[in-house]
């Protein structure tokens, strides 16, 4: 494969991908309803009722979310990838860390393809998340 | 050495044309979905696979000719029937390479790339591995070289096999005629293979002839009552082609590095994806078992 062929292929790829983006715009935001649907799909071991009753924090950017699941079913992190959703579930909140910035939290995970997720939230929501994650960490370290 | 064309390279312009046709059909009908970044990643992976293949082809070709030159039992020559025989035997070898690509983590590390899209369209067909030559896959074709078929013929047939598999990566075609579905790999059969519904995991490994799955017990038909949902059991959280290409290799390396016993280190390579010494992750067998148990439990009458 020569350089010209490689360059031509790259241009063709960009054009086709742009056409895909143009013809199929991502119009569906990450809502609580979608989060519930995807959690049920990816975490079938969690009872449906617990997923429905989880506390959802949806980022103001509509592309990421955290679900605090009751009764020791842990925490789920959801990230919109294009028009689909990727889910990570942790039995124990101590498996991830939450960092606070001015108007958002950054959830950091030991995951090569989803190392962190940033959520833009209200101050109240940030405090709520931090209280849960910090409480858990203190419990773990105690 | 026989000088035969590379079918996949000849077919590339047709691949692009068919992707455009499917995309426009999907846009007009609303029945097929594309996504810009997903498509970009798939096509970049395809291009990268071609480059990686060109860089590492010497390994596979060298091995094949070494076996054929030194150990071939017969000289089959280059008659037309040899091409037909080579195509059938290569397809059988492909079945086992592909099956092991799902059942052995070392080979899965290369093959997972092809399954990493949550979409299923013709661009997914081009989402190919960059690291296939780093796996023992070529060993499954060794018996064909040992038998005495010229490796050039086998590689030519393998190329035709890959070209055939392009068109089955679509939701635009529901079912082919019954006789065709019975013998050949089709979009319906291959949708099942790409699905991550527990019911459909680890099934339909065939390349061209569906009979291999029926013979070796891995055939699962597509059920209208359960639409296929595509991707991995743990989907990727990135479109970065480098991370897509190498994520499972990184995972293997981390697991081997952190293992305490040599047995565990070996099993992190050779056991099915998801295997861990303490069972803390799920293999596809565990996922299927849990799914069956949930199904049984939901059927059981409430006390």
Image (tube, coloured by chain):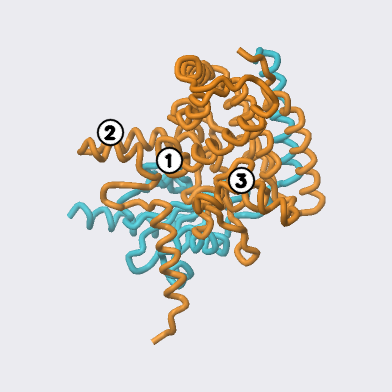
Chain colours: A cyan, B orange
> What residue would you read off at disc 1?
A115
Q: Residue at x 44, y 26 (%)?
A: B134
- In three-dimensional space, the C-alpha distance between marks 1 and 2, rounded to whole angstroms, equals 20 Å
Mark closest to the chain's N terminus, 3 or 1: 3
> What residue would you read off at disc 2?
B257
Q: What element carries label 3?
A: loop
**Side (left or right) of B102 relative to A90:** right
Instruction: Name the chain letter of the residue that bears numbered label 3.
Output: A
Residue B290 sits above or below residue B245 on the image: below
Classify the position of the N terminus of chain B by image quarter.
top right
Numbered badge on residue B154: none
Classify the position of the C terminus of chain B by image quarter.
bottom left
Q: Residue at x 35, y 48 (%)?
A: A96
Can residue B205 be seen in the rendering of this structure? yes
Task: Specify few, some or many for label 2: CA neighbours under 10 Å numbering under 14, 14-19, or 20 or more.
Answer: few
Residue in the foreground of this view, choosing between B198 and B76: B76
Q: Image quadrant of residue B100?
A: top left
Q: Is mark 1 on a helix, strand or loop?
A: loop
- In three-dimensional space, the C-alpha distance between marks 3 and 2, rounded to whole angstroms, equals 34 Å
Residue B180 sits above or below residue B57 on the image: below
> What residue would you read off at disc 3?
A82
- In three-dimensional space, the C-alpha distance between marks 3 and 1, rounded to whole angstroms, equals 17 Å
Task: Specify few, some or many for label 3: CA neighbours under 10 Å numbering under 14, 14-19, or 20 or more.
Answer: many
């Amino acid at each position: 494969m020569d350089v010209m062929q490689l360059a031509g292929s790259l241009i063709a790829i960009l054009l086709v991908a742009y056409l895909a983006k143009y013809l199929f715009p991502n119009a569906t935001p990450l809502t609580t309803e979608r989060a519930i649907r995807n959690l049920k799909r990816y975490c079938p071991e969690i009872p449906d009722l617990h997923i429905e009753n989880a506390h959802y924090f949806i980022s103001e950017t509509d592309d990421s979310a955290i679900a605090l699941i009751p009764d020791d079913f842990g925490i789920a992190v959801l990230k919109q990838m294009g028009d689909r959703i990727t889910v990570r579930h942790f039995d124990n909140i101590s498996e991830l860390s939450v960092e606070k910035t001015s108007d958002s939290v950054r959830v950091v995970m030991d995951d090569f393809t989803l190392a962190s997720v940033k959520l833009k939230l209200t101050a109240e929501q940030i405090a709520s998340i931090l209280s849960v994650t910090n409480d858990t960490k203190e419990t773990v370290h105690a | 050495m026989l000088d035969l064309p590379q079918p996949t390279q000849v077919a590339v312009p047709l691949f692009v044309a068919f992707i455009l046709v499917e995309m426009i059909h999907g846009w007009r009908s609303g029945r097929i979905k594309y996504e810009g970044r997903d498509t970009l990643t798939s096509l970049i992976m395809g291009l990268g696979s071609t480059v990686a293949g060109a860089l590492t082809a010497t390994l596979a070709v060298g091995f094949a000719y070494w076996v054929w030159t030194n150990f071939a039992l017969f000289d089959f020559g280059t008659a037309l029937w040899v091409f037909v025989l080579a195509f059938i035997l290569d397809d059988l070898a492909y079945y086992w390479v592909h099956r092991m690509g799902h059942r052995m983590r070392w080979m899965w590390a290369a093959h997972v790339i092809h399954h990493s899209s949550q979409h299923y369209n013709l661009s997914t067909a081009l989402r190919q591995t960059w690291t296939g030559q780093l796996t023992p896959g070529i060993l499954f074709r060794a018996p064909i070289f040992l038998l005495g078929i010229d490796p050039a013929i086998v590689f030519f047939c393998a190329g035709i096999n890959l070209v055939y598999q392009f068109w089955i990566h679509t939701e635009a075609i529901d079912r082919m005629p019954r006789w065709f579905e019975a013998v050949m790999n089709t979009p319906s059969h291959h949708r099942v293979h790409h699905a991550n519904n527990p019911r459909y995991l680890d099934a339909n490994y065939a390349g061209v002839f569906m009979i291999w799955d029926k013979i070796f017990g891995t055939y699962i038909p597509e059920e209208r009552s359960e639409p296929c949902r595509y991707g991995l059991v743990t989907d990727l959280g990135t479109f970065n082609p480098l991370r897509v290409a190498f994520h499972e290799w990184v995972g293997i390396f981390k697991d081997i590095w952190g293992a305490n016993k040599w047995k565990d280190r070996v099993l992190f390579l050779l056991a099915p994806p998801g295997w861990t010494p303490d069972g803390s992750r799920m293999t596809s067998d565990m996922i299927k078992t849990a799914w069956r148990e949930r199904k049984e439990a939901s059927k059981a009458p409430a006390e």
